[in-house]
Amino acid sequence: MLNIGKYLNFSIKVALANLNKLHHPYKIFLVITKSCGSRCLNCHIWREVPTNELGLDEYEKLSINLGKHLSWLNISGGEPTDRDDLIEILKIFIKNCPNLLIVNFTSNGLNQKKLIEAAEYLSNSNIPIIGINISIDGPEKMHIKLRGGEDSYLKAIASLKALRKLKNIKVHASMTLFEANSHLIEETFKEIKGHIPNFRRTQLHLNQSFHSEHYYRNKASSGETPKLQPHIGTKSLLRFLAPMEILKSIYLKNLIKFQKTKKNPIPCSSLTSNVYISEHGDLYTCTIWNQKVGSLRNEEFDLHKIMNTQKAKDLRLDISNNKCINCWSPCEAFPSILDNLLKIHK
């Protein structure tokens, strides 16, 4: 009964978003650390020295303020498992946010022990939808070239295998596409399948690389834009009736459209249903556009108060008028798809 209530609550929020009547974000993209053991060429997070990151007492305040409004918690880093108190952070949000339906995060898979501990905790929690992605950016040689670490690929595969043994968790390999690896999607799938025979195509999640000053810290990196049309097939996904597979199919179809126009293919929900919160408690519009809205630390972690400032209202108007940076990052795209179901033409 509890899970039915969470699904119903989330459905109501999505319906309100479709009617432009949602007053509180239902999803937060929460960066808990910038610590990371990977050495990715296109992401410079690992070059930062983590300092003054939010503590458990601050997550307590934030989660209490979010309360019943939060339905989707997207944990991120850096590498989430680099926080020794990851499970404690999860416990705080689960305790204080009674309508929490979805918890998901992506890991590099380098610390399998801590990853499985966190996954087992979630697996035995009351969260209905749990998603964990393991970053695999190509066949072994390409993965190592893009992400560093001679054993990083085999560790990622081992973590992917271990996660798949747990109950109640949707596990995917996540491949970020660059000019260097976008032609290797099929080869990547086959190599993973060689390690995991029952691995399915729909379990390889694809997304395009982006630049972000405040998140990836990679403004100065090369502006590679892979040409995806020859390498991505979207029609095959439509035969699956699972809601997430339908969302992924819509995402991929519109990713190809975005590459042609460089404009948001669907109205963006950032700073409406979805917000970005940094490891220091700073509120940004999203993962890509470097627009700081305010500091939660300065406002007693009252997200609603910051969301109702004139600056937030002005930024929301810019986003609605497509005056933002324009992107199609999955972190923002998935809630945007949900919030525009009435506008999507099949």
Image (cartoon, helix red, strand yellow):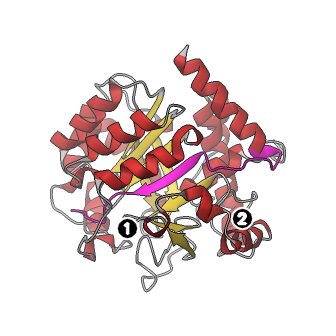
| Residue at left offset 34%, top offset 75% | 44
Type of amino acid under label 1: His
Residue 31 magenta? yes
Residue placed most toward the observer, 25 or 247: 25
What residue is pinned by disc 2? 264
Could you tell me residue 116's position as x and y percent? 23, 36
- Tell me if 88 is positioned left or right of 266 in this view: left
What residue is pinned by disc 1? 280
Q: Quadrant of the N terminus?
A: top right
Could you tell me residue 123's position as x and y percent? 34, 26
Could you tell me residue 297's position as x and y percent? 43, 66
User: Residue 272 sits in which quadrant?
Assistant: bottom right
| Residue at left offset 36%, top offset 55% | 58
Badge 2 density bin: few <14, some 14–19, many ≥20, Cα 10 Å: many
| Residue at left offset 72%, top offset 67% | 316
Could you tell me residue 326's position as x and y percent? 67, 71
Q: Quadrant of the C terminus?
A: top right
User: Residue 164 sits in which quadrant?
Assistant: top left
Badge 1 density bin: few <14, some 14–19, many ≥20, Cα 10 Å: some
| Element class at badge 2 | loop
Q: Residues in magenta?
A: 17-37
Q: Give the label, 1 or 2, closer to the camera.
A: 1
Real-space Cα separation, disc 1 to disc 2, in angstroms: 28 Å
